[in-house]
Structures are given as structure tokens and as C-alpha cells.
Image (tube, helix red, strand yellow):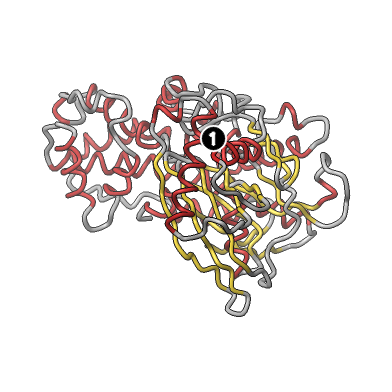
Amino acid sequence: MSSAEAKGENGTQISKMAKMSGDASTLDGIPPDTLSKVQEHLKCFRLSLEKLQVVSARLRKDMVRGLGKHTHHKAPVKMLPTFVRATPDGTEKGDFLALDLGGTNFRVLHVRVVEEEQKVLKMDSQICAIPKEMMLGTGEQLFDHIAACLSDFLVSQDLKGQTLPLGFTFSFPCEQKEIDKSILIRWTKGFNCSGVEGKDVVKLLKEAIHRRGDYDIGSVAMVNDTVGTMMSCGYKDQSCEIGMIVGTGTNACYMEEMTNVKRVEGREGRMCINTEWGGFGDDGSLKDILTEFDVVVDETSINPGVHTFEKMISGMYLGEIVRLLLVRLTEDELLFKGRASKALLTRGNFETKFISEIEEQDSGLENAQNILTLLGLKWDAVDSRVVRLVCSAVSSRSARLCAAALATIANRIRVNRGLDRLKTTVGVDGTVYRKHPK
């Protein structure tokens, strides 16, 4: 949970957050000539405040296109209505099931909302893995697996026989028709299950449960993970009107004025909009800041040409960007005496979690050396420092782009309400946000 202030159109918030995400790498110990050559390779990852303001202005235009009745179908930033009309007011209570699917694992939870204490108590939870082959198999296999894991959880909690309402967090681009009807637009984050795109995922889940016939669920509220993050944060802090995820993927939502939501009937009040900002740039608008390494990551991904912004920011891709940079520096004999290992040359072998470990303030260099050893590389002290510098450049660009996009949303809310200054809270979640040391 973080607090954000939007002041004026010229991106004061971008400036603040961009500075916060600056390099903290220790440059001591890298010979000046080597450092100069490495920095030349990293120059394309260092975005100036002026460039971030340009990115913000482009996103602002794309958000307007996404909200438009006649322009949304061609907009790269989809701005999807969620049918969530208000944030929590603290009076909610009861027992609920929660299902969170957004990556290679999914979580099943039993939560109890206690009004008197304004607390959401996690009674228990279970994490279930989704095997790689299932991520690329049929939709029926995937939802049968989810239904089976939910059944096991109910048995373990002695909840079989109870019919509890279910909150379903499904963190993929969907066209929400109603609170319990949501059509998958496209798979992202390494998923490509057949027979799901264009279908109602709530219906697919219910059908899988009914095929089992050993339990039932109550009403289903379908939300994106950004919406879930905003709502859970908003239960304790009613000033929270933005949710942001920086994890396997990236996305954000916020409370928009109904007068601007052209695709939904009614003009009173507000509605939460799921921006799907991961698609920003899919029309080529970010071509001027894409590096050659971003292009390779996109071309070798499961969904080329899709989710351009996400591929520059999120955990699914950051490790691979670093790996490609390390290979290039090795080819130019700026790392490892010009000798790469088979592991370094293999796609996907440099995990995003390595970046977080290498950027740890106290143990980062030691972590870097352990990771380089794990990758079968012959390194020296300079190599470990250069690798840390590369990680910092890639993660800092990710942070700056997130800052620019978040500032765009905060400024939109401010302008919508005719305010000179907006004070709001941002609910933030995701593995990159939680695990990166900065």
C-alpha cells in the first residue's frame, strides 16, 4: 500500500518516483574503461524525465481511446469496465472463498471479514501448482484441475456441505459483462489453453465444479487482480482508489467517473476501470523506447506483438532481458573474459528473482557470485559488479515506466475531479513489487 499525490499535468509525481528508482549500484571496482563501455550498452535503458513525460502523455491519450464507445475496439489500452461501482466502506462481513489465478500457481483461500474489527482474516489457504503442459493444454483440463484443488481445500477445511460465496480473481485480459460474467480476450503470461478465449471463464469454472458433483459454490464475484488489490486495500483505507500489480505481469485499475465510461449505461457515480495497461504500445507507440533486447524478448515470447508495455516491466520478462544483455557484454569481451556458459546462452535460465537477489544492498555481490557460479560461469570481482549494474539498469527502467503510468492515472483522477491536488492511496501487489529490495 502506498500513498500518491498528483500535482499538475507536468508529472511532478513522475519526477519523484523516477528519482526514487535511480541506480544504487556500487560502481567502485569497475575499471573506468570497462565502465564506460558497459554504460554505453545500458544507455538505451535510461529514460529521461522528458521521455517519461512523453510516455505519460501517450498513455493518457490511449486511456481516452479505450474509454470511447467507438474507439475502444482499436485501443491498445482496453480500459475495461469492471461493474464494481464503489470501494469498500468497512461494514462488510461474513465468510467467503477466494480463488486467485494469475500465474504458474493459483491460491485458494477461506477468509472471514469481521466488521467490528475492520479486519479481513485469512482463515487458511492452499497454493496449487499449474504444470507447464497444463498451461498449454485444453481449457477443460485447466478448470478441472482448479475445481479438484478447490474440492481438496474444502475437505481440508471441513467446509464441504457449506455453500459459500466465491471471489474469483482471474488476472488475464477479460471483457466484463456483469460482476459474474467475464469473457477472456486473450491469454498472457505463458498461458495458451485452447477453448477459453472468447468464453465466459466464470461459466467454465462452474461447469468444471458441476462435472465433479461433490460440492457447490454460492454467488461468484469475478475481479481482476488489480481490482482485488484495490478493494482489499480499500477495506482498511477508504482513500484507496487505485490498484496496481507488478508481478508476473503488470496492470492497474482506478475509479473513473461514469460520465466517461461510454460503453456502460448510466452517468451517475463512478466505476472501477481495469486499464489492461500491459497492452500499451501494442500499436507501435513505444517503438522509440524499445531496445533491441526488448524486440528479441517479444519475438521469442508465446505472444509476439502483444503486451509490449508488460514485457518491459514485469517478472515474466525482466530476467530474460538481463540474460540477453549479459550475453552481448560477454560477446564484446566485457564480461567473463568473453566466454559464456551453455546455461547463460539458454533462454529463460536467468530468472527474474536473480535480479532481486543481486540488488540486495548488503549481500548482493555475494549473491551475484553464487548465481554466476550456478550458471557455470568463470567470474571475477569486476564481473559481479558489472552484472549488478546491468540488473539495476533493467529494474530501474521498469520502476520508472511504472511510475510514469501510475502518475498518468493519478493525474487523470485529479483532472476528472477538478482538483489542483489529489491525495490518494495506491494498493500495490505482485512478486516484483514485494521481493525487489528497492
At 79% across and 59% down in the image, what residue appears? 417
Residue 366, horizontal then vertical, whole percent: 17, 49
Q: Is residue 307 above or below residue 389?
A: above
Based on the displayed image, in which of its 4 quarters is residue 241 positioned? bottom right
At 41% across and 45% down in the image, what residue appears? 128
Q: Is residue 59 above or below residue 342?
A: below
The answer to whether residue 312 is left or right of residue 181 is left
In the displayed orientation, state which residue is furthest to the bottom.
116
Q: Is residue 33 above or below residue 429?
A: above
In the rendered image, which residue does mark 1 sit on? 309
- So how many labels did they put on this image? 1
Position of the C terminus by quadrant: bottom left
The answer to whether residue 174 is left or right of residue 351 is right
Neighbour tally class for label 1: few under 14, some 14-19, many 20 plus, Cα within 10 Å: many
At 87% across and 45% down in the image, what residue appears? 265
- Residue closest to the eye, 297 or 419: 297
Residue 317, horizontal then vertical, whole percent: 41, 34
Identify the secondary structure beneath mark 1.
helix
Residue 435, horizontal then vertical, whole percent: 37, 53
Amino acid at dot 1: Phe
- Residue closest to the eye, 408 or 219: 219
- Residue closest to the eye, 50 or 142: 142
